[in-house]
Amino acid sequence: MEAKEATPVDADNVPNDEPEIQRLNQQHWLLTVLKGGKLHLAPLPPDRPLKILDVGCGSGIWAIQMAEVYPTATIMGMDVAPIQPKK
Ligand SMILES: C[S@@+](CC[C@H](N)C(=O)[O-])C[C@H]1O[C@@H](n2cnc3c(N)ncnc32)[C@H](O)[C@@H]1O
């Protein structure tokens, strides 16, 4: 019997493989739809520089989309699992 390769897991023992990345991205899409297409509900000032920190950013999809909406903001995503796109 051949040994099965272990699925990579994050600090919470949750898989951080490709199916999990896809699940997180689908969950992000669903939550955004439920918020009427909004990425956040915070009253962010449109006229001041923004600094945004996404702790436990997962695939990074929210931080990436926030950067598209707020191109002058400084946005940092951090996660123990290095599953974010390089570019
Ligand atoms: C449920 S996922 C949410 C991902 C993302 N925020 C989203 O909404 O799609 C939780 C994330 O937290 C990360 N995480 C868990 N413990 C952490 C820690 N101590 N420091 C940084 N990230 C952590 C995991 O690796 C995982 O990507």
Image (tube, rainbow, N blue to C red):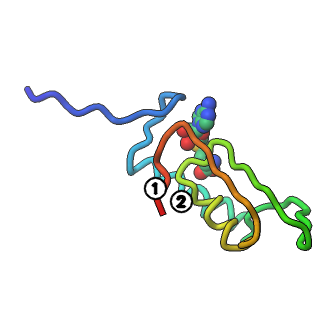
Looking at the rendered structure, the kind of residue marked 2 is Gln
Q: CA distance from mark 1 to mark 2?
A: 6 Å
Front-most of residues 5 and 78 = 78
Would you name the residue on which mark 1 appears? 22
Determine whether label 1 and label 2 are within 8 Å by CB.
yes
Residue 19 vertical placement versus 7 (above, below): below
Judge the density around disc 1: few (<14), some (14-19), many (≥20) Cα neighbours within 10 Å: few
Say what secondary structure mark 2 lies in: helix
Q: Which mark is residue 79?
A: none
Which residue is at the front of the view, 23 or 66? 66
Q: Which residue does the numbered mark 2 point to in the structure image?
A: 26
Quadrant for ligand 1?
top right
The image quadrant of residue 41 is bottom right
The reply, left or right, for residue 8 in relation to residue 26 is: left
**With 59 as the anchor, is 55 left or right in this view?**
right
Outermost left residue: 1
The CB of the residue at mark 2 lies under 8 Å from ligand 1: no
**Residue lying at 72% horizontally and 64% vertically, measured from the top left:** 34
Residue at x 61%, y 64% (from the top left corner): 64
Which percent across, then down, holds residue 28? Answer: 61, 58
The residue at 46%/51% (across/down) is 21
Crowding at mark 2 (Cα within 10 Å: few <14, some 14-19, many 20+): few
Query: Residue at point 91% right, 62% down?
Result: 43
Mark 1: which amino acid?
Gln
Q: Is residue 84 left or right of residue 62?
A: left
Q: At which x and y percent is residue 60?
A: 57, 55
Indicate whether 47 appears above or below 50: below
Q: Secondary structure at mark 1?
A: helix
Q: In the rendered image, which quarter contains the N terminus? A: top left
Report x, y in % for residue 63: 65, 59
Residue 62 percent coordinates (x, y): 64, 59
